Image: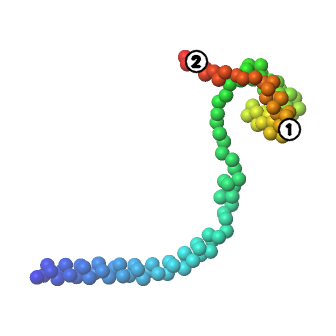
């Protein structure tokens, strides 16, 4: 019987502890109200991420003469005091193509011709 009393007292002691923690948890409701007030305003970090485009990495094939043209344009930019990368040159070319009229764009693309997509041989 003594063992039964210790079980009962252990159970009652255990039931009293959660009751105290529940009372302590009630004052924590006020800080959550502050969190609710902070939610409507957008944070700076989210807006910066929304404005930034993801970078896409791709590969392509082009004739060697046109590839060398990129180096020529890069040298001309360096002489003018502009440090520019190949990707920026290609992006500038895309922008220029996008601003062309439809007839001018078609004529420019017709001059290029098709290039066979060649993959480098594995060593």
Q: Residue furthest right?
A: 80
Label 2 Cα neighbours within 10 Å, binned few <14 / some 14-19 / many ≥20: few
95 vs 8: above or below = above
Give 37 or 113, whichever is nearer the viewer: 113
> Residue drawn at (67%, 28%), measured in percent from left and top?
60
Looking at the image, is 54 positioned above or below residue 4?
A: above
Q: Can you give x and y, in whole percent of width and height, for residue 54 in the image?
A: 66, 45
- Depicted 64 relative to depicted 40: above or below: above
Answer above or below: position of 48 versus 110.
Answer: below
Do the residues bearing badges 1 and 2 touch, measured as CB atoms within 8 Å? no
- The reply, left or right, for residue 20 in relation to residue 66 is left
What is the CA distance from the residue labelled 1 to the residue labelled 2? Answer: 39 Å
Between 96 and 38, the one nearer to me in the picture: 96
Quarter of the picture holding the C terminus: top right
Does 23 sit left or right of 58 as displayed? left
Residue at (44% x, 80% y) in the render:
24
Indicate the quadrant containing the N terminus: top left, top right, bottom left or bottom right. Answer: bottom left
Kindly indicate the quadrant of the structure image that contains residue 66: top right
Residue at numbered disc 2:
121
Quadrant position of residue 84: top right
Res. 26 visible in picture: yes
Residue 84 can be seen in this image: no
Quadrant location of residue 105? top right
Q: Which residue is mark 1?
A: 101
Q: Secondary structure at mark 2?
A: loop
Q: Position of residue 63 (x, y in %)?
A: 73, 20
Q: Secondary structure at mark 1?
A: loop
Q: Where residue 44 sits in the image (x, y, percent)?
A: 68, 60
Q: Residues within 10 Å of mark 1 (few under 14, many from 20)?
A: few
């Amino acid at each position: 019987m003594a063992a039964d009393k210790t079980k009962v007292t252990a159970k009652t002691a255990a039931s009293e502890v959660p009751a105290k923690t529940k009372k302590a948890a009630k004052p924590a409701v006020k800080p959550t109200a502050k969190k609710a007030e902070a939610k409507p305003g957008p944070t700076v970090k989210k807006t910066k991420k929304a404005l930034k485009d993801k970078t896409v990495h791709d590969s392509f094939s082009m004739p060697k003469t046109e590839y060398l043209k990129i180096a020529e344009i890069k040298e001309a930019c360096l002489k003018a005091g502009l440090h520019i990368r190949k990707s920026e040159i290609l992006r500038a070319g895309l922008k220029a193509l996008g601003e062309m009229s439809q007839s001018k764009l078609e004529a420019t693309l017709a001059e290029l011709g098709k290039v066979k997509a060649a993959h480098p041989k594995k060593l």
